[in-house]
Amino acid sequence: MRKDNGMLAFTMVAIALIFAVAFFALNANKTADYEKKEKTNAVVTGSVASGSQSGAAVPECIDGAKTPCKMDACAGEKICIGGKWSMCVLLPKVCVPNSTVACSYDNCRFGKALCDPCGNGYGKCGLVECAANEKCEKQ
């Protein structure tokens, strides 16, 4: 009978150990999940313990917002799409860069206006300088 009691005690200890291991394993997973969730919440709200930081989940901008930008020397715009800024898009061209058009300088004289290097528009009308041997005409 003593042998049976010893086997019973061994079995009970083994079962207790199995339950203890299972309990600690479950709690360890819950703790890890809780810590991961807290870190994720901190990144989303921007409140990380080391200071305010913006995480990947925080949008850079509000959809539809626009901000000016430059590409080389030309003006453009960035547009917010899906919480992120687009690449710089140049403003539409209205003239061929560095081309000229005839314009009325005053009631008696004609001049020329020069298209800016970006093609966004013409500058002020200016008088055309003619060389002494050149005939200036309306264009």
Image: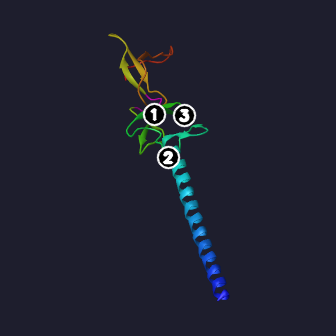
Identify the amino acid type marked 3. Answer: Asp
Q: Which residues are magenta?
A: 95-99
Labels 3, 1: front one:
1
Q: Residues within 10 Å of mark 2 (few under 14, many from 20)?
A: some
Q: Of helix, strand and loop, which one carries label 2?
A: helix
| Residue 5 appears in the figure | yes
Disc 2 vs disc 3: which is toward the camera?
2
| Of 83 and 104, the residue lying toward us | 83
The residue identified by callout 3 is: 72
Q: Which residue is mark 2?
A: 41
- The residue at 38%/32% (across/down) is 94
Tell me which corner region of the image, top left, top right, bottom left or bottom right, holds residue 12: bottom right
Q: Is residue 44 magenta?
A: no
Q: How is the image coloured?
A: rainbow
Closer to the chain start, of discs 1 and 2, is 2
Q: Most prominent secondary structure in the magenta stretch?
A: loop
Of the residues tagged 1 and 2, which is closer to the observer?
A: 2
Q: Earlier in the sequence, mark 2 or mark 3?
A: 2
Secondary structure found at label 3: loop
Judge left or right: residue 9 versus residue 123.
right
